Amino acid sequence: MLTWLTHTVNGLAYGSLLFLVASGLTITFGLLRTVNLAHGAFYLLGGYLAYDLASDGTDYWIALALAVLAAAAMGTVVQRAFLHYVAGRELPQIVLTLGIAYIIGDQILANYGGDPVAPQTPPGLEGPVTIGDWTFPKFRLVMIGVAIAVAVFAGALLRFTPTGAKVRAAVDDEEIARAVGIRVPLIFLLVFGFGTGLAAFAGVWGGAFTSLSPDSGFDMLLLALIVVVVGGLGSIGGALLAAFAVGLIDQYGKVWFPEWALFTLYASVAALLAVRPRGLFGKAVTR
């Protein structure tokens, strides 16, 4: 019984990491309809920056904050300098963001080599927690709580604040939003920066969970896209539930059918989308 409890919590912890990656993509892709294939590169950028700073003696939490801010700033530059001019045009967005992803990945490869690096576990979260006869890494348990907290914060920000109301208005009808005085380009700029900042945060914590390598960004991007589509475009709560489901399917697939683990995951996703093409909580959102 304790073994299955460990597998279940492992799956939820991995799903929490996927949600931290997918939360930013849910905002930039699901809400803004910006196809950002560089999202995985921002995940790597945050993780490697924090790893560098912490290796040089910077306090962990300061390194985390600086990495997130740097990635968010770079995201705003990319949005304003490039994506702003191809808004609503998916093919140029794909080519552009894919090129940015390769540039960032090549720079990481040139500076760090191809060997994986293992960023520091957050201070105070090292070691296991023991509940009766059950022992589990403390960091992974906390990650589940962090994912839920991020989902609640992001959902509340978009639904219950004036800023969230402006974002929804700009997404639903850009022309009317401009007519009533909403600065739509600024809103899109800040939202895109927020999304890339979330990707960087996931990179810092995800690196401590699974380690980082120059090619892991594309792996995380693919899984994040699955979470976003299964959860429903633009749905934070849907992304959280989808991430937990993907994490559990991945974990139990590796336990029950190790040779068929990838098939188990992608077949489950295909079956769900065949029944619900818009995902769990997807809506027909247009700009």
Image (spheres, rainbow, N blue to C red):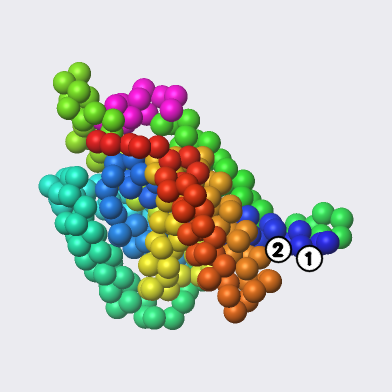
User: As shown in the figure, which amino acid type bears the numbered disc 2?
Assistant: His
- Left or right of 126? Residue 177 is left
Residue at image coords 54%, 60%:
268
Residue at image coords 28%, 44%:
33
Q: Is residue 32 above or below residue 56?
A: above
**Mark 1 surroundings: few (<14), some (14-19) or many (≥20) residues within 10 A:** few
Quarter of the rendering occupied by the C terminus: top left
Examine the residues drawn in magenta and state their main secondary structure: helix
Q: Tell me the SS state at disc 2.
A: helix
Q: Is residue 261 above or below residue 140?
A: below
The quadrant in which residue 178 appears is top left
**Magenta residues, start to end:** 159-170
**Mark 2 surroundings: few (<14), some (14-19) or many (≥20) residues within 10 A:** some
Q: CA distance from mark 2 to mark 1?
A: 6 Å
Q: Which numbered tag is attached to residue 7?
A: 2
- Left or right of 252? Residue 236 is left
Q: Which numbered tag is attached to residue 3?
A: 1
